Amino acid sequence: MPKGIMPEDEDRLVDTHEAARLLGLKEGTLRKQRVYGGGCHFHKLSRTVRYSLRDIERYKALNRVASTSEHWAAR
C-alpha cells in the first residue's frame, strides 16, 4: 500500500484524480482505459466512477516487470 494507507482502508474508493495520482498516470489515460479496457478495475456507481485502493495496488503488482523484454515474453 502507498505510504499512509492502512490495511483497513484497502476498500476505500477514490476518484479518477486520486487514482491517476496513485498510479502515476494522467486522468485522460484512465478514461481511455475505461473505454478500451486493459486498465485498472473500477466501480461505476450511477454516473460516478471510483477506484478501490485494493484494485489500484493489485493493478500495480500485476504490471510489475524486471525488464522491458519481460512484458512481451509473457504473451
Image (spheres, rainbow, N blue to C red):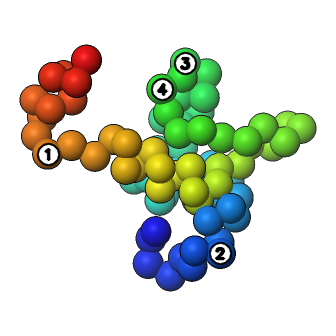
Of marks 1 and 3, the one in the foreground: 1
Q: Position of residue 18 (x, y in %)?
A: 58, 59
Read off the residue under disc 4: 38
Disc 1 and disc 4: Cα gap in Å?
Answer: 20 Å
Look at label 1 and name its amino acid: Ala
**Pointers 3 and 4 in contact (C-beta within 8 Å):** yes
Of marks 3 and 4, the one in the foreground: 4
Read off the residue under disc 1: 66
Look at label 4 and name its amino acid: Gly
Query: In percent of the image, x 65 and y 75: which residue is there?
Result: 8
Disc 2 and disc 4: Cα gap in Å?
Answer: 27 Å
Q: Earlier in the sequence, mark 1 or mark 4?
A: 4
Of marks 2 and 4, the one in the foreground: 2
Q: Is residue 9 left or right of residue 48?
A: left
Q: Position of residue 7 (x, y in %)?
A: 58, 74
Read off the residue under disc 2: 8
* Secondary structure under the numbered disc 3 in the rendered image: helix
Q: Earlier in the sequence, mark 1 or mark 3?
A: 3
Q: Earlier in the sequence, mark 2 or mark 1?
A: 2
Q: Quadrant of residue 32?
A: top right
Read off the residue under disc 3: 36
Query: How crowded is the residue under tag 2: few (<14 C-alpha within 10 Å), some, or many (20+)?
Result: few
**Residue 6 appears in the picture as rendered:** yes
Disc 3 and disc 4: Cα gap in Å?
Answer: 7 Å
Query: How crowded is the residue under tag 4: few (<14 C-alpha within 10 Å), some, or many (20+)?
Result: few
**Pointers 2 and 4 in contact (C-beta within 8 Å):** no
Disc 2 and disc 1: Cα gap in Å?
Answer: 30 Å
Look at label 3 and name its amino acid: Tyr
Q: Quadrant of residue 9?
A: bottom right
Disc 3 and disc 2: Cα gap in Å?
Answer: 31 Å
Q: Is residue 70 left or right of residue 75?
A: left
Query: How crowded is the residue under tag 3: few (<14 C-alpha within 10 Å), some, or many (20+)?
Result: few
